[in-house]
Image (cartoon, coloured by chain):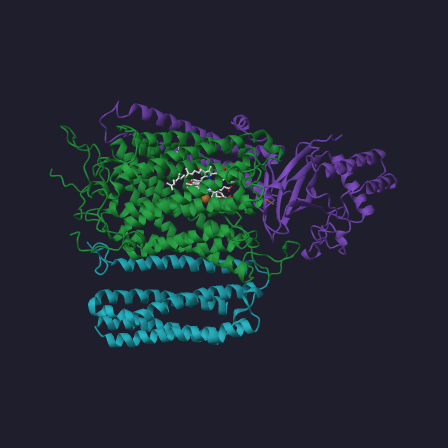
Amino acid sequence: MEVPYTVKPRPDTGLYNAKIGVWLFLASEVMLFGALFSSYILLRMGASSWYVGSEALNVPIGTFNTMVLIVSSVTVVMAWASLRMDDLKKYKMYMGITILLGLVFLVVKILFEYLPKIDHGHVPSEHNFYAIYFVLTGLHALHVIGGLVLNAYLWGPGTKMWETEPEQFTNRIEIAGLYWHFVDIVWIFLFPTIYLL
Amino acid sequence: MTDHHHEEPFWRKYIFSVDHKVIGIQYAVTAMIFLLFGFCLMLIMRWNLAYPGEVIPIVGKLLSEDGMLTPDGYNSFGAMHGTIMVFLGVVPLAVGGFGNYVLPLQVGAPDMAFPKINMASYWTFFLGGVCMLASFFMPQGTASSGWTMYAPLSVIATTGETMWLVGMVFLITSSLLGSVNFIVTVIQLRANGLTWMRLPFFVWTQFVTAFLLLLAFPPLEAAAVFQIMDRVAGTSFFLPSGLYVGGEVLNVAGGGTPLLWQHLFWFLAHPEVYVLILPAMGIVAEVIANNTRKPLWGYRSMVYSIIFLGFMSFVVWAHHMFLTGMGTTMAAFFQTTTMIISIPSVIILSALFISLWGGSIRFTTPMLFALGFLPMFGIGGLTGLPLGLASADIHLHDTYYVIGHFHYVVAPGTIFALFAGIYYWFPKVTGKRMNEALGKTHFYGSFICINGVFMPMFIQGLAGVSRRLYDGGSTYLHAQPVLQWNEFMTIAALGLFFFQIFFIINLIISLAKGEKVSSNVWDATTLEWAAAPSPPLPHVNFEKVPDVYHGPYEYSTNSGGNGQPDFTPQHKKINS
Amino acid sequence: MLELLKKVGFTEGYSAQSPAIDSVMSWVHILMLILFLGWGVFFLYTLVRFRQKKNPKADPVGVTNHYSTYSEAAVAIFEIILLVAFSFPVWASRVENLPDNGDAEVIRVIGQQFKWNIHYSGEDGVFGRTVADSIDDQALNFIGLDRENEAAKDDIIPTQGHLHLPVDRNIIVELSTRDVIHSFAIPVMRVKQDAIPGIRIPTWFTPTKTGSWEIACAQLCGNSHYEMKGYVHVHTQKGYEAYMKTLSVIHEVDDYDYTIKSEETLKKVLEALKSNEAFDAEELALLALSQAEAAQAEQELSGDDYEWDEE
Ligand code: HEA
Ligand code: HEA
Ligand code: CUA
Ligand SMILES: [Cu+2]
């Protein structure tokens, strides 16, 4: 006897297991970032001095990265849609683009933001502004890396599943997509909070 | 039906198993060992409380050259006792152990929704435990700033602290994985006909608990990351500037606040205490319904109560922080929510008391422990009320009154409920039954001793004796009138330990040659007993997926005459 | 109820705020006792009456009345009363409605691993500036008083761990800490307040009885947390003034070393006291003298002279 509803939705809930699972996981992620943002607010309100984000950080690069992530959010949907239309080739392409965009985000982040900052001595211990900047964006970057690993797997070796269980594979892409959207949304909150306010 | 899975190698079957039953047992065994370990730490501490500065018998030589417990040792044992008992003992046993083993069976599921994640959850927990244990071997010892790890003390503490934080991150991750699994299993894998209001109360408690774990733990994860940064990267999330530590001004940027840690910690840790109690209530409810041979009284209101309790538990956290300089409005808010949250507990406890009325009470060992739970949790809960009133908390905060309060809920409360669960489900897991005579000795002995340990704490607390005192307050004059209790409590704790030996022996001999019993030894209605063999089949649990036609506790509701059983299993269709 | 609580360890209350807190304590314990006894009796009676032997056939319905709902409602109402009538107002008076500075003695207490430092503002009523950089334990400057600061000149810092107070006066303790969290607790005065690094939190009370009691540290603050004991010495108004005078003289004689460490210093202080014109009344000087001796005794016995005689 297999675990039911791994692929097909359960009639009365209308969802398959993993979809509920990922929503729950994201709920807990919301709590995680919620706590991080609340801490940011608390620290900032209590601080005697605070940097102006737009002066201390590189807004154009941040904006660029925001765009990158937003586009990648679109392509990941396209990847899923392609599978729904039985087009594995297109899926490969869109998923590939998503992964590339994720990589671009990370590389830009590291090369043009983290490294120059550290070079200029703007390390976390300098001020709580940089501390929270590095922790928030760092944790976000970890999430991006996690997403990249997942997507890369689904783009590469994971694709085998398409032959045997296409429906489940499509579900997996949907879930990976949901996660990727979340990573994107977190950034959309992060960017204005840290870079602009 | 059962033979579609092939023989698995040993390591797949018992070590990296994905079967929820094996994982449940792994969790339970690991947790019990941790409980015993946490207890032993406390015995050493208690010895020192009664006889400060005297050589510790038996293990003294392991602790230090001269065989005594140092103040540092006391603090590190205290922190680890709290951490181990809560995060590595009770939660893994109640949720990881009982939840994993019983919940899928009770909802009629073949396994957890995500068996592999389930396995990952156990092994992450295991890693967390290893981290915590490893810190005992660090050159400077374990974390030692209480289980609450208040900054800045924890930030300036030794490296064991970092281990604690890393271990915590593992434990949090493990809980997240577990809780997602539990929730999805309950939502998706319920048997046909098993509607929400037909779920056994135990399933409800696990369900709510899973939500608490899922949503309350991440903030602590954030806090742990902050504290690791403070310790390793020199940030000052929890440090204001101008601290003078170890003979010099601490060289940090400053600008942080220690209260941030406290908020994040208690935002987890208050829901966490309900994580400790809810599964216990679930177990007790199962055992009581079964042993009174009647349905739970007020099942519905109990369900609504725990849901309400779950929600409320997110908005009371700062009642642990009344004395951190809280203003009137904040204090009023948190006092009010704290009083509100006591009401559902009162409702649940009342319902359990009333459930006894009209029953035909069988005093089996699990029932004794379940009955013991009721007044013990009652005392613990009642003594929470003065703590929840900020103005009374001025006197009681951080005294032994608090220690007494929560131990009554967790030790004779939760631990007793867990014992009830072990005695109750042991035949399910092994097909054998535990020895009743040993079991009853275990109960009566433990019951008397445990009250001897914790009751005097209220007396000391009222006298204003602070907690976490290495010498138990022996140099404080205001402690003098109540000091003699320290020795009394220690002796009682040793007695408590003595009676646990009966349990361990019972466990071993029952495993080896316990009396073989029928599948449904307790004449129970719920699916895990009524619809599955004992022990259940590997991986699939049931010979046939049950369909459910009744509520969970149809005891004595049919005629029951003429040798007919007095109960109606949930999956028995009755033509009427 | 209060009597009952006192039988089981509850301390006496020696501050004007104690009765209010004690009444919350007794009312909530009354509620607890009622619930405990009520349900306890019900529980035991049920166990006996419905044991299997006596009652082989269970009644699946059980209780049909609504008494439990009433009792739950009663608990809720009781709790609301406790909150609104007792706890809120008491809390407000403890933390918000502080007495005016004119109507109170303002004293700073600074926690340190593992001692309590006391800081009086002296005659000018203004506290001198304190900065972490000036902390110098060797020079007995535990709180980092900036000695160049004008306001600091007349500040008085008595022996560590000894807080001297006048009786029947409002006392505002401004609490802070130089390192980790401590908690300033005087159980017999129903006073407890955490000292949080980075902020200064006021707490207030009014001692009503002369004598000496202990200050406990209620928050884990490191390995010697258990030793972080202090004393409150409550004097008559006159005794208090004399004590303060003595200290300021010591301060002048011994240049910032407020603790009478040697026989020699003590002699010097006594000399100064006798010749100082500030003391117009001989009576006062004598009082001060006894205080100086007491201060020395404290130092030597580190508090073992628990209740020395006041007048
Ligand atoms: C399982 C754990 C658990 C549970 C269930 C509770 C339940 C409650 N707790 Fe407790 N609490 C802890 C674990 C728990 N607590 C821990 C671990 C700490 C200390 C942490 C630390 O500082 O280290 C703590 C500390 C703590 C504090 C902080 C004290 C301080 O530090 O100063 C407060 C303050 O409000 C509080 C309040 C309450 C309240 C109001 C309840 C209520 O939910 C209780 C409601 C229950 C009832 C009101 C009982 C009803 C009884 C009857 C109806 C009848 C009884 C009949 C008989 C006995 C026969 N608790
Ligand atoms: C779930 C939580 C839990 C549990 C169960 C316990 C159980 C016990 N605790 Fe603990 N305790 C805490 C959580 C818990 N404690 C916390 C959080 C603190 C605060 C720490 C801090 O200050 O930071 C604390 C602090 C604390 C103190 C105060 C220390 C101080 O302030 O200085 C004391 C003092 O006596 C104490 C005593 C005990 C005793 C005697 C038990 C006994 O009841 C133990 C009984 C144990 C058992 C009955 C388990 C037996 C298990 C088995 C026998 C399993 C069998 C095993 C196999 C088969 C392998 N505890
Ligand atoms: Cu200072 Cu404990
Ligand atoms: Cu709480």
Decide if residue A144 is on the left or right side of residue B571.
right
The quarter of the displayed image where residue B277 is located = top left
Visual hue assigned to chain A: cyan
Q: Residue at x 30, y 54 (%)?
A: B11
Residues C88 and B271: in front is B271
Residue drawn at (73%, 33%) of the image: C236
Image quadrant where one finds the C terminus of chain C: top right
Determine whether, in the image, residue A114 is placed left or right of residue B286. Answer: right
- Residue C156 place in picture, x, y as percent: 75, 46
Identify whether A22 is placed above or below B71.
below
Spot occupied by residue B329 in the image (x, y as percentages of width and height): 51, 47
Q: Is residue C311 left or right of residue C92?
A: right
Is residue B103 among the parts visible in the rendering? Answer: yes
Residue C261 vs residue B466, the one in the foreground: C261
Determine which quarter of the picture holds residue C107.
top right
The residue closer to the viewer here, B436 or C282, is B436
Q: Which chain is purple?
A: C
**Visible in this render: residue B284?**
no
Q: Which chain is green?
A: B
